[in-house]
Image (cartoon, rainbow, N blue to C red):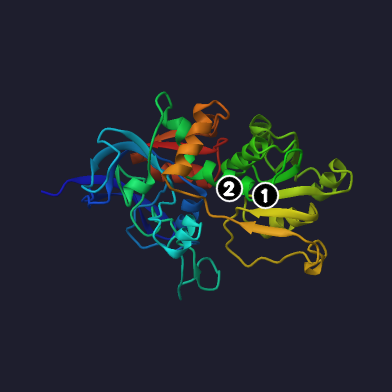
Amino acid sequence: MTAMMKAAVFVEKGRIELADKPIPDVGPNDALVRITTTTICGTDVHILKGEYPVAKGLTVGHEPVGVIEKLGSAVQGYQEGQRVIAGAICPNFNSYAAQDGFPSQDGSYLAARGLCGCHGYKATAGWRFGNLIDGTQAEYVLVPDAQANLAPIPDGLTDEQVLMCPDIMSTGFKGAENANIRIGDTVVVFAQGPIGLCATAGARLLGATTIIAVDGNDHRLGIAKKMGADATLNFRNVDVVEEVMKLTGGKGADSSIEALGTQATFAQAMQVLKPGGTLSSLGVYSEDLSIPLAQFAAGLGDHTIRTALCPGGKERMRRLMNVIAANRLDLGVLVTHQRRLDEIVEAYDLFSHQRDGVLKIAIKP
């Protein structure tokens, strides 16, 4: 008799529901991980709303914390019963993109089926969980290319402490890394959701000494202060571009990080830059973008615009967990709610409507 498990699956636009699915078989390069904690991401909400296309019946979710239940015969260096995480991006490192130094883009291809109006570019890349293969909002998840993607959790760290590492922390830090931050720089971070808060923390760790956090929620701006922001701006109360120019003496910021994915925040992130500044974009955009012509200096302003998909792989996960283990950063404060897996529908409703001060929800099967 086939062993079954509970899993949150995409049914149709507006519906993610709990269903019974077979526990996956383990191939030689795979690992079966019993999920102890996972969470809901903003990208999962895009899937729920039908803004990002996935197959009906697919298990969603891409942030796994768990225990190795079964190892494939070819996987070495791990043992069953070991606590592990795997990155939301789980490349196999064999593609041209991976060999060229961009493993997060492993498997990207051009397809007739476009992504969110992006004119045919299907940015699946190394993002397989909850996109191309069954994901992590389930009792078990099959981790492909496990030897390259599993990362042991250091002793003494809780699930909640490392829950941000597979995606949110990796993405936010990549936004800071892509911002060309130097010691003493001024950085503006637009949107202080979980990814923006991690970008704020990453900017501080990289040496920025004036970090300006922008959001419309005073509670989140308060958390941004704890993450390393030196100044906070509520866009509902002030002209953000004008205030940044005041804070920088009219020079503009060295870098900006856009962590929401809207035309308005992208345009402001461009407008606050100094000549030669860098805009680091983390947003998942669902419509075409326009670049403000004047602030872009008609293409002559020596600006840099960089985009990113969160890096994965075991080495990236090891480095991020080292930051947590060394007490350089506490991201457990971002886990504001807990729900059981059988409460997943209610958890999506809570998270997608941003009620009750929610930042991240720990989902426990």
SS under mark 1: loop
Residue underneath mark 1: 179
Residue nearest the observer in this picture, 147 or 278: 147
Residue 4: give its label. none
What is the crowding at mark 2: few (fewer than 14 residues within 10 Å), some, or many (at least 20)?
Answer: many
Residue nearest the observer in this picture, 71 or 2: 71
Question: Marks 1 and 2, Cα distance to the nearest angstrom?
Answer: 8 Å
Q: Residue at x 55, y 47 (%)?
A: 171
- Identify the image quadrant of the C terminus: top left
Q: Quadrant of residue 64?
A: top left
Residue nearest the observer in this picture, 300 or 111: 300
Query: Quick check: 92 left or right of 51?
Result: left
Residue 365 shows up from this direction: no
Residue 174: give its label. 2
* Kind of residue indicated by mark 1: Ala
Of all residues, the one furthest to the bottom in this rendering is: 112
Query: Quick check: 130 left or right of 291?
Result: left
Q: Position of residue 206 (x, y in %)?
A: 66, 39
Q: Residue at x 36, y 45 (%)?
A: 137
Of all residues, the one furthest to the top in this rendering is: 156
Residue nearest the observer in this picture, 32 or 49: 32
Q: Position of residue 109 (x, y in %)?
A: 45, 69
SS under mark 2: helix
Q: Earlier in the sequence, mark 1 or mark 2?
A: 2
Q: How many marks?
A: 2
Q: Position of residue 231 (x, y in %)?
A: 76, 35
Q: Is residue 69 above or below residue 250?
A: above
Q: Position of residue 93 (x, y in %)?
A: 40, 56
* Kind of residue indicated by mark 2: Lys
Query: Quick check: 250 left or right of 33?
Result: right
